Amino acid sequence: MKNSNLKKETSRLLKRVLITAGMVVVGFALLILLLTPLRNWGARKYLNAGDQKLANLEYVSAEIEYQKAGILTPLSADVRLKIDLAQNAETDITRLRDFSTINDARSTINDLKAIDAQNDPMALTKLSRTFIERNQPQMAVAASEKATSLKENYRDGLLYLAIAYDRAARGGTIRKTSVDYLLSKSAEALTAAHKSDPAYFAEFPAAK
């Protein structure tokens, strides 16, 4: 008799546990369904804020906004792509070509078009100098890179490329990995400039 009552009590207890667990699962599922639209709205808000920052070339600030969106939607491929874009653009502004068109970033679009329109190494080097004077070192890098790709061992193009890389590394708020990369590229360009015309550099006194 006692065993029979114990079995019944155990059965009732098990049913209560199963019912409670089921209610918890259903409640959790409903909570997710209710919160998903809110999370998506919040993520979109941060993505838009990140896009505005990136359009203004504020790379680190843009990445922070994208990371906020990622917290709300951790499985979003769009967020990951935006973070990658912000990081890659720190060292290569041409990565923003499509982004700038979509987001109507007129200044970046016009500057890239100016570089695209030129195919003369000397003109591109002059354009690079203009960008440096305007405190736009990333655009100067793009112009000088095109100049040196069109004319191999072009001393002036390499010199301005070295300057542009150095200014890009020191002129903005970017990650240390990007700073180190740009400074190494500046050193490479300067070394290449020396090799392209040793006699030119021999005219200058060695630094003490």
Image (spheres, rainbow, N blue to C red):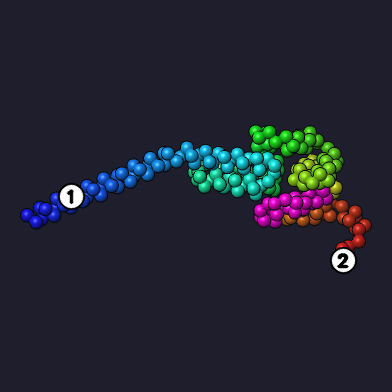
Q: Where is 64 relative to 118, above or below?
A: below
Q: Please tell me which residue is depicted at 80% across the width and 54% down the height of the picture.
A: 190
Q: Please tell me which residue is depicted at 63% across the width and 45% down the height of the picture.
A: 62
- Residue 146 placed where, x, y %? 77, 41
Q: Disc 2 marks which residue?
A: 208
| Residue extending farthest left | 1
Query: Which image quadrant is residue 202 in?
Result: bottom right
Q: Where is 80 relative to 186, above or below?
A: above
- Residue 143 placed where, x, y %? 78, 42
Q: Is residue 71 left or right of residue 137?
A: left
- Is residue 70 at all visible to an observer of this figure? yes
What stretch of residues is rendered in magenta?
158-182
Label 2 element class: loop
Residue type at mark 1 is Ser
Q: Is residue 132 left or right of residue 63?
A: right
Q: CA distance from mark 1 to mark 2?
A: 91 Å
Q: Disc 1 marks which residue?
A: 11
Crowd band around label 2 with a 10 angstrom C-alpha radius: few (<14), some (14–19), many (20+): few
Label 1 element class: helix
Looking at the image, is mark 1 or mark 2 earlier in the sequence? 1
State how many labels appear.
2
